[in-house]
Image (cartoon, rainbow, N blue to C red):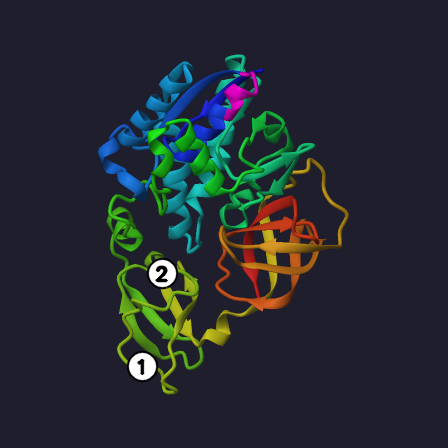
Amino acid sequence: MKVLAAMSGGVDSAVAAALAVDAGHEVTGVHLALSRQPGTLRTGSRGCCTVEDALDARRVADLLGIPYYVWDFSEEFAQDVVADFLAEYQAGRTPNPCLRCNETIKFAALLDRAISLGFDAVATGHHVKLADGILHRSVDEGKDQSYVLAVLTAEQLSHTMFPLGEMTKTQVRAEAARRGFAVAAKPDSYDICFIPEGDTQAYLAEKLGERPGPIVDAETGEQLGEHTGYFGYTIGQRKGLGLQRPAADGKPRYVLGIEPVSGTVTVGPAAGLQVTEITAAHRIVYSTGKQPRFPMRTVAQVRAHGGTVGGTADLVDGAIRIDLDAPISGIAPGQTVVLYDADDEYVIGAATITGSR
């Protein structure tokens, strides 16, 4: 097959490309340029898609003896990921830009271009297994990335390869070292690549401006302070609230709600974060290609790492409603909930959370 290997410049995508070559495929490497001003993106281990990463990817492609290109997706990235990120926070929701990047850039724009150029599939270094068209968790539980790929459609998955699904991260690094890849010990990227200093709150303030509003106690309605922008807060946040005095019981307060119209941030005790029901009505995708039979037993995951709980999912008025077996905290509109089978092995679908209680 003609395979386009997406090469981020990290160790995972390097080994994935190498394994695709070993499998006998006709492989071409491509690095995605997501900014026309790469200096605005992070360097080293704190981001991805930098000039440094592009050079690392080129060195691996040279060792593998495969063609290598850099494709400019900066316009698509700015519109579909960065603009979406800002719009979601402005609406009082909590987005996941890495998940959105996978959905709109790496497995939509990139895959569409690859298919149009005659490639049969795109190979990536994600830690996930694909068996009979169904997305399964990686054997490395700590590195499993099925959550951020659950937004992919069955059609997209049919043109995708995940060579690392049966490998642990330790094995990937060992394989890279054996092949002489300089990226064998390169740290993993983390945080949001388009926020240069890693300060999300400062970035949002710069882009969205100051919008003062009250911080209100959920139990008494009393104003406890004032903020400069509600979009700088997230559900479950404890630190940096700027409250003028402590709670009467001496216990910490957390952000329980964000109301963008009035700009009100509501805070209260940790118990106020506990939810046992989730509703998800937007961006519903069934990665298996067909709607499951509702109601059904499921394992729901609400964060890329952790946030997993069993429950029963049903379809109510076009929205997915999940009754959880145990309370879970820190649920915010805009987050993605991913549904796994009852044994927590493979992905059934995903949707954007619109409410909880």
In the picture, which quadrant includes the N terminus?
A: top right
- Residue 125: x and y, percent? 48, 33
| Numbered circle sitting on residue 246 | 1
**194 vs 263: above or below:** above
Can you tell which mark lies on residue 58? none
Q: Nearer the viewer, residue 87 or 324?
A: 324
Which kind of residue does numbered mark 1 sit on? Pro
> Which residue is most to the front?
178
Quarter of the figure that contains the C terminus: bottom right
**Are circles 2 and 1 on residues that touch, CB within 8 Å?**
no
State which quadrant residue 131 falls in. top right
Q: From this viewpoint, is residue 42 visible?
A: no
Q: Secondary structure at mark 2?
A: loop
In the rendered structure, which amino acid carries the disc numbered 2? Answer: Tyr
Write the start and end of the magenta stretch as one range: 19-25
Residue under the image location 42 percent in, 43 percent down:
97
